[in-house]
Amino acid sequence: FKEKLGLKADVLYKIGDTYYNNNEAGNYYWGYALAKMNFSEADVYNLANVGTQILSKGKRSFDEPWELDAVLDGWNQYQKDQGACEGSNTSDCDHTNVDMYSKPK
């Protein structure tokens, strides 16, 4: 995905108030695109991990926590852009960043 976006390895990308490297920026936009296709937050989380397993040919089982954060940041931003985070549903659009020191689910 990052190749299609033309993201360069030696650049930090500022999206909102956060700086992302090329991998994380690609993950952010991937999460945004999946949200646009009506994938749930749980689906996006699981797809991120499955994608890591496939791309690493089984050497890694889970996305790194900061990679998951970027994917979920993108998913949440799409929800906010669509107005889904207004009123009483705001808790649906807030995710807690993944604890990088915890064991994967």
Image (cartoon, rainbow, N blue to C red):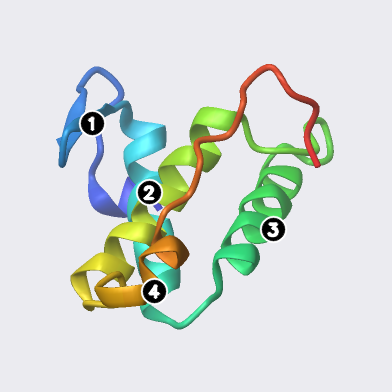
| Mark earlier in primary sequence (2, 1) | 1
| Mark earlier in primary sequence (4, 2) | 2
Callout count? 4
Asked if residue 6 is positioned above or below residue 23 in the image, the reply reads below
| Res 89 label | 4
Alpha carbon distance from label 1 to label 4 = 24 Å
Q: Is residue 27 rendered to the left or right of residue 102?
A: left
Disc 4 marks a residue whose amino acid type is: Asn
* Residue 30 position by quadrant: bottom left
Q: Which residue is mark 2?
A: 73
- Do the numbered discs 2 and 1 sit on residues whose CB atoms are within 8 Å? yes
In front: label 1 or label 4: 4
- Do the numbered discs 1 and 3 sit on residues whose CB atoms are within 8 Å? no
Q: Which residue is mark 3?
A: 46
| Mark earlier in primary sequence (1, 4) | 1
Alpha carbon distance from label 3 to label 4 = 23 Å
In front: label 4 or label 2: 4
Disc 1 marks a residue whose amino acid type is: Thr
Q: Secondary structure at mark 1?
A: strand
In the image, what residue occupies the spot 73% across and 54% down? 50
